[in-house]
Amino acid sequence: MDNLLSIAQLSNEEIMSIINKAHEFKEGKVEQFNGYAANLFFENSTRTKCSFEMAERKLGLDVIPFETSTSSVTKGESLYDTAKTLESIGVDVLVIRHSQQDYYKELVNLSIPVVNGGDGSGQHPSQCLLDLMTIYEEYGTFEGLKILICGDILNSRVARSNHEALTRLGAEVHFAAPDYWQDKSLNADYVAIDDVIEEIDVCMLLRVQHERHNGAKTFEEAHYHHDFGLTGERYNKLKERAIVMHPAPVNRGVEIESQLVEASKSRIFKQMENGVYTRMSILSHILTKGDK
Ligand code: CP
C-alpha cells in the first residue's frame, strides 16, 4: 500500500488486513518506525487529527507540528507547495484533510505517501476503516448484516466510504434521509427509519454537516430529530444485539437523544478508541508497504 486516498483503491483482502492488524495493535502488538509525520488539517478536526497524532507517536514517529493558521498557507501558498515543502525538509508521511474533493489528485508528483484524512464531501477512508473494525469486532463478519446509515447523506464523506466498503464486504446497506439530503448518484436503497429499526444490526447516524449547507437553513432540528433521529422510543425497538454508531462530533438532541450517546448499545466512544489502532495499522501498512 503506497498511500490511502479512498476506499476504492483497497481490495477486500487489504481492508481485512488493515482491520486484523488494528486488532493486533489493540491487543498490545508493538511496532516501531524511524521517521517524521506531519498532519495538515485545512478543515477543523478533533478525532481524526488527534487520533493520527496518537497513532504516529505510538509507532515511534516524530510529529512535525503544522497549523494552517500559522503557516504560509495564510500568505497564499498552495496545497501542493506546502506538501512539497514538507517533503523537501524530510517528512516521511503526510496526513491531509482538505475541503476540496479529490484534493490529492494535485499531489501525484510527491514522492512521500499521503493519507486522506477527509476530502470535502468525497471520502473519509480512515473513518470508514475504524467503523469497519468496530462492526467486525462486534459481529466477526460483514456478510448479511443489515446496516442503516441515517442523516445528511448528500454531504457525508463517511456515508460514501461506508456504503462502498460495506456493500462490497457483503452487508445490506440502507439509507434514511430527508429528500434534500439524499444523494441520488449513489445506487442506494432509501427507507423510512421506522420501517427497518427493528431489523437492523447497526444503526449508523451521521452528523448534520452545517458547514456544507452554505448558510441555508434547510431543516428544523426538532422536526429532524422526530423524523430521522435516534429517539428513546426507536432505541428500545432495536434488536438486543444491535449497535449504534456515529462518526462524531455529535449534535446531541438532533441526530441522537443526548442520554443515548453513552447507552449500552452505543459504540460511539469505542469507534474513537478503535480509530487509534486503525490509524496505526494504516500507517504501518504504508510504511512497510504491506511487507510486515
Ligand atoms: N469523525 C471525524 O472525522 O471527526 P473530526 O472531524 O473531529 O476529525
Image (cartoon, rainbow, N blue to C red):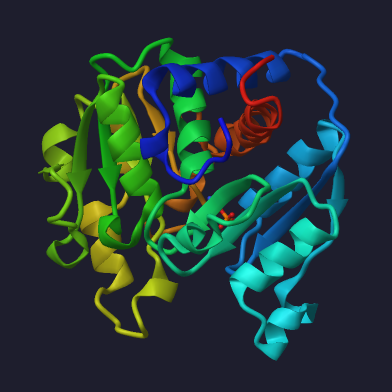
Q: In this view, does 282 lie to the left or right of 104?
A: right
Quadrant housing the N terminus: top right
Residue at x 38%, y 20% (from the top left corner): 12
- Residue 250 seen anywhere in this rendered image of the structure: no
> Which of the 4 image quadrants contains residue 193?
top left
Quadrant housing the C terminus: top right
Which quadrant of the render holds ligand 1? bottom right
Q: Where is residue 283 in the image (x, y as percent from the top left)?
A: 67, 34
Q: Nearer the viewer, residue 12 or 217?
A: 12
Residue at x 19%, y 48% (from the top left corner): 176
Q: In this view, does 91 lie to the left or right of 242?
A: right
> Which of the 4 image quadrants contains residue 273?
top right
Q: Where is residue 127 in the image (x, y as percent from the top left)?
A: 51, 42
Q: Which of 150 and 163 is in front in this view?
A: 163
Q: Where is residue 103 in the image (x, y as percent from the top left)?
A: 48, 63
As drawn, the residue found furthest toward the top would be 140
159 versus 97 height, above or below: above
Q: Where is residue 201 in the image (x, y as percent from the top left)?
A: 30, 23
Q: Is residue 25 left or right of residue 142?
A: right
